[in-house]
Amino acid sequence: MCGLVGIFDTVGRREVNRRLLAGMNDSLRHRGPDGAGLHLAPGIGLGHRRLAIIDIAGGHQPLFNEDGDVAVVFNGEIYNFGELAAELMRLGHCFRTHSDTEVIVHAWEEWGEACLTRFRGMFAFALWDQRNETLFLARDRLGKKPLYHALLPDGHLLFGSELKALMMHPGFERTLDPCAVEDFFALGYVPDPKAIYTGARKLPPAHSLRWRRGQPPPEPRRYWDVSFAEPLAITADEAAEELRRRLRDCVAVRMVADVPLGAFLSGGVDSSGVVATMAGLSAEPVRTFSIGFGERAYDESAYAQAMAERYGTDHTMRRVEASAVDLINRLAAIYDEPFADASALPTLAVAEMARRGVTVALSGDGGDEVLAGYRRHAWHVREESVRRLLPPPLRRPLFGLAGRLYPKLDWAPRPLRAKATLQELALDPAEAYFASVSTNGDALRRRLFSDSFRRQLMGYRAAEVVTSRMAAARDWDPLSQIQYADIHTWLAGGILTKVDRASMAASLEVRVPMLDHGFVEWAARLPPTLRLAGGDGKHVLKEALRPQVSADILYRPKQGFRVPLAEWFRGPLRDRLRAELLGPRLAETGWFDMPTVATLVDQHGSGRRDHSTALWALLAFAAFLRQVHERPSAQPAVLSGAAE
C-alpha cells in the first residue's frame, strides 16, 4: 500500500519543479513510510511513497520496463501477479523483481488499456509511456484505492492519492463546490467524481484516463461494471457451498504478504466469517483487533471476544470513549474533504492499534452492499411491494397526507417511526431510496442552508447521485436496483473512503476479501431470495457460515459500527458542541441559517429530538474549514495528532 503523485504538462515539455514534486510526495508520507522515489523527464514528474508489503528489497518505485521508457507509480496490490508474470514471461517479457508492480508495466506493453481487465486486486496507478508521450491513470473496479486529479489553467495536470497532495501546489485553486457541499450534508460524504473543490475531480472506480500530450482533455472511460442480470439457477445449499469455496479463495490470496498480517474483528457476521476462514488457512493464531464502547447498546466487543476464543486468535481490544471526538481536527486533516461518518473515529482507533502489531489487516467490509445486509434493503423491498399495489395518482396524495399528519418519533424503534415510511411510500422508488440513505433529509437541509446558499445550488439536489444510479438499473428487481446504487455511491464514497484514509493514516494496509471483483460478480447473480429471505439480509452468507460462526452472532439484530454521538452530545461534549457550532466559523461562510443551527443544538441537548447526525456533520464541516480549507498550500496537514 502506497501513495502516488504526479505533474503532467499536457501541452508541452516544461520542466517540472523537483522541489514542488517532492513536497507533494512527502505530504503522503503516512501512506508510505518505508521509502520515497521520484522520476522527472521533460514535462512529466512522478512521485511515490512506499509501504513495503511484497518484495521488500526489490519493489521500489517509480518502476520501469526493460527499456526505461515506461514508468509506473502504483498504490495497491495485484493478487494474481504471479500467474500474470508467468504468462508475460512466456510472451518474452523480462522481469527484474518479484514485485506485483512490475506486472503493470509489462501488461501495459502487451495488452494496452485492456491490461486492466486482467488485474485481480485493488489499485490506483499512474503510468507514463515515453514512446508516445501518454499518461494513463486507472482505478480499481470497486474503488478501494483513491485517485484525485486537477487540470490547472496553465495546462498542467496534477494527480495524487489524496487531495492534500494537489493542495500543496500553489496553482491549485480552493473554490468550494456548492453542489459537493449539498452532497455532503445529504449523504455524509462527497461522491465520485466530485471533489469538495470545483477544480479537482476523483477518478471514478472502474475508470481509466488516457491523455496523450497535445491532445484535448479526455473523458474517463469505464472498463467494468457489476451486473445483476441473468440470475443463476442455483439452490440454497449449492449457493452456500459455493460461497464458502469462493470466500476461502478470496481470503487465501489476501493472506500473501512478506510482513505481519492480522484482521479486524467487530463481532458482526462479515468480519467473523473472514476471521473464521483465516483461522482455517493459518497454522499460526490469527492476530485480531476490535473496538468497544462503554455504552452497552453500542458495544459488540463481547461477540468479538467469543469469536477470538473459539478460534484461539491473538486478540487485542481497545475501548473508545467520548474523548475520541477530540480527534475531529485530525480526521479533517486525514480525509481532506468533509466526511461525516462518525465510525471513522473507531476505524482510526482500530487501525492504529493493529499497526502496532501488523502491517496488513483483512476486514469484512463490503458484505452488506454485495449481499444485501442493510436493514434499509429489507424496508425498501417491503415498501416497493406496497407501492406496486396502488397507482401513483392514488398513492402519492394518500401516503403524502398520512405522512404529514403522523408525528415524528425519532426516539422510537423503526416500526413506530412510521412518518418516514409513509412519506417514502408517497415517493417513486428512487426518491424513496434516496430519502432512506440521506443522513439529513431534504426538509432539514432546506432549513439548515441560507437563502444565498440555496441560490448557489441553482436547483441542484443530492438526490441526483442516487436516482441516476437507480435509473441505470431500472430493468432489475427492486433489491438489485438499490444494491447497484449502494455499490456505486455509499460503498466507494463512504465505506471504502473511510477505511482507506483511516488505515493509511496509520500506515496500515487493509484488504477486503468480500470485494474481490469475481466474488462480487457471482454474488450479484444470486437470486434475490438468496440475498434477502423473509427480511433476513445476507441470508446465503449466514447459511454458509453456520458451521463456522455461532447462531447468536449470525442471527442477532444488525448493529453496525455505530458511535454513541447522541449520548456524548448531551453529556460530556455538550459545551464543546455549542461553542464549535455557534461560534464564528460556520456563521462567516454565509451558507447556514444560524438560528436553525442553534435550534438543532438546543433541541438535542434537551432530549426532545435526536439531531446527532446533523450536528456531527456540522462539526465535521467546521473542522474541514479550519484544518484543510484555511491551511496554507505549502503547510502539510497534521496527521499524527490532534491539531491546534
Image: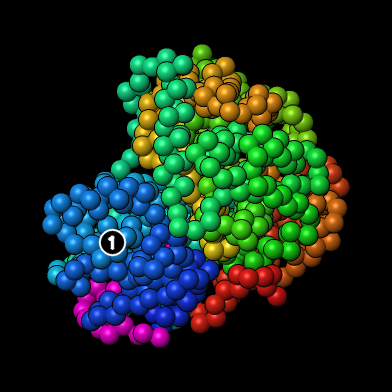
Left of 492 or right of it: where is 586?
right
Residue 216 x %, y %: 21, 66
Magenta-drawn stretch contains 13? yes
Q: Closest to the observer: 602 or 640?
A: 640
Looking at the image, residue 292 lies above or below residue 325: above
Q: Could you tell me the amino acid type at mark 1?
A: Glu
Report crowding for label 1: few under 14, some 14 to 19, many 20 or more residues within 10 A (C-alpha).
many
Looking at the image, residue 548 lies above or below residue 457: above
Which residue does the numbered mark 1 point to in the structure image? 102
Q: Quadrant of residue 451?
A: bottom right
Quarter of the image that includes the N terminus: bottom left
Left of 76 or right of it: where is 131?
left
Residue 118 visible in image: yes
Left of 600 or right of it: where is 434?
left
Residue 522 x %, y %: 37, 30
- Range shown magenta: 1-19
The residue lying at 69 percent from left, 37 percent from top is 309
